[in-house]
Image (tube, helix red, strand yellow):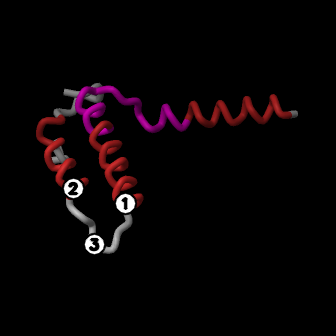
Amino acid sequence: MNSTGHDTRDERHEFLDSRQTHQLRQEPCRGHRDEEREATLALLKILVLGNHAIEQGQFRPAEDVFADLGRQAVEEEKDAK
């Protein structure tokens, strides 16, 4: 269970394992440059890390994050004056 009480085992998504990621790096991507392939792999890694953090319950509700961002923006605006 995660911090919200949901069982994430039933909601897991399959992501690339390291062998599949290695294969993507080795296989040429038709019509894509190396930079685009590397950027895609970097985004996939971010997704994997995010999914792992969620499965471990290491996240905050979006409402809390946006509330903090709003408070920070107000403070920065006050400091700028």
Task: Name above or below for residue 41 compared with residue 54.
Answer: below
User: Whole-percent x and y of residue 43?
Assistant: 36, 49
- Mark 3 lies on a secondary structure that is loop
Magenta part, dominant SS: helix
Residue at the spot x=18%, y=42% of the render?
Answer: 18
In the picture of the structure, the residue carrying the numbered disc 3 is 30
Query: On the picture, is 62 further left or further right than 75?
Result: left
Q: Which mark is residue 13?
A: none
Residue at the spot x=39%, y=61% of the render?
Answer: 36
Task: Name above or below for residue 21 compared with residue 1.
Answer: below
Q: Are marks 3 and 2 in contact (CB under 8 Å)?
A: no
User: Whole-percent x and y of residue 58?
Assistant: 33, 26
Which image quadrant is residue 55 in?
top left
Which image quadrant is residue 5 in?
top left
Q: Are marks 1 and 2 in contact (CB under 8 Å)?
A: no
- Mark 2 lies on a secondary structure that is helix
| Neighbourhood count class around disc 2 (C-alpha, 10 Å): few under 14, some 14–19, many 20 upward | few
**Label 3 sits on what residue type?**
Arg
Viewer-closest of 9 and 23:
23
Residue at the spot x=36%, y=30% of the render?
Answer: 59
Tell me the magenta residue range.
50-66
Q: Hey, which residue is sitting farthest bottom in the picture? A: 31
- Mark 1 lies on a secondary structure that is helix
Is tag 1's residue or tag 2's residue first in the polypeptide sequence? 2
Q: CA distance from mark 1 to mark 2?
A: 11 Å
